[in-house]
Image (cartoon, rainbow, N blue to C red):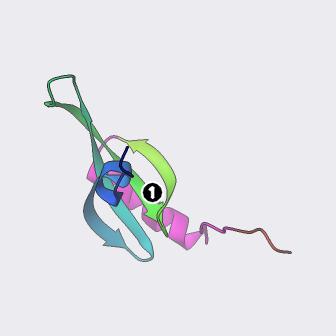
Amino acid sequence: MARKNKKETLGNYVAKVRYFDIYQKFNRDRTGKAQSSEYRIVHAKNVIKDGIPNKTKATEFAVSMSNSGIKYEKHNKS
């Protein structure tokens, strides 16, 4: 099997809010038609928040998380 590419795992790139990227992921049925979509907030190819219903809420979440200083850290070094 081939490796999944970035578009299959994260979705379609929509916008950038400070250091977060917002992607739109479509949920498809068996025939390949899009049933619904959801937005996700990504930082450094890692999903921070998933399942947001619309773009305006996603941008609000991203702004509030950037104001509070939330980032993805690979290794939690103290």
Q: Quadrant of residue 56?
A: bottom left
Disc 1 crowd rating (10 Å Cα; few below 14, some 14-19, many 20+) is some
As drawn, the residue found furthest toward the right would be: 78
Quarter of the rendering occupied by the C terminus: bottom right
Residue 67 lies in quadrant: bottom right
| Residue 66: % across, % down | 52, 71
Quadrant where the N terminus is found in the figure: top left
Corner quadrant of residue 58: bottom left
Which of the pair 7/60 is nearer the observer? 7
State the SS at label 1: helix
| Residue 27 on the magenta segment | no
Q: Residue visible at 45% across and 76% down?
A: 19
Q: Which residue is mark 1?
A: 61
> Residue at the location (35% across, 59% down)?
6
On the image, the x and y values in percent for residue 14 come to 24, 62
* Left or right of 71, for residue 18: left
Work out whether 14 lies above or below 1. below
Residue 8 higher or lower than 77, as above or below:
above
The residue lying furthest to the top in this view is 30
User: Which range of residues does the magenta coloring cover?
Assistant: 53-74
Residue 57 is inside the magenta segment: yes
Q: Give the residue at the far front of this rendering.
A: 1
Residue type highlighted by circle 1: Phe
Q: Nearer the viewer, residue 76 or 39?
A: 76
Q: Is residue 1 above or below residue 36?
A: below
Residue 29 x, y percent position in the rendering: 22, 24
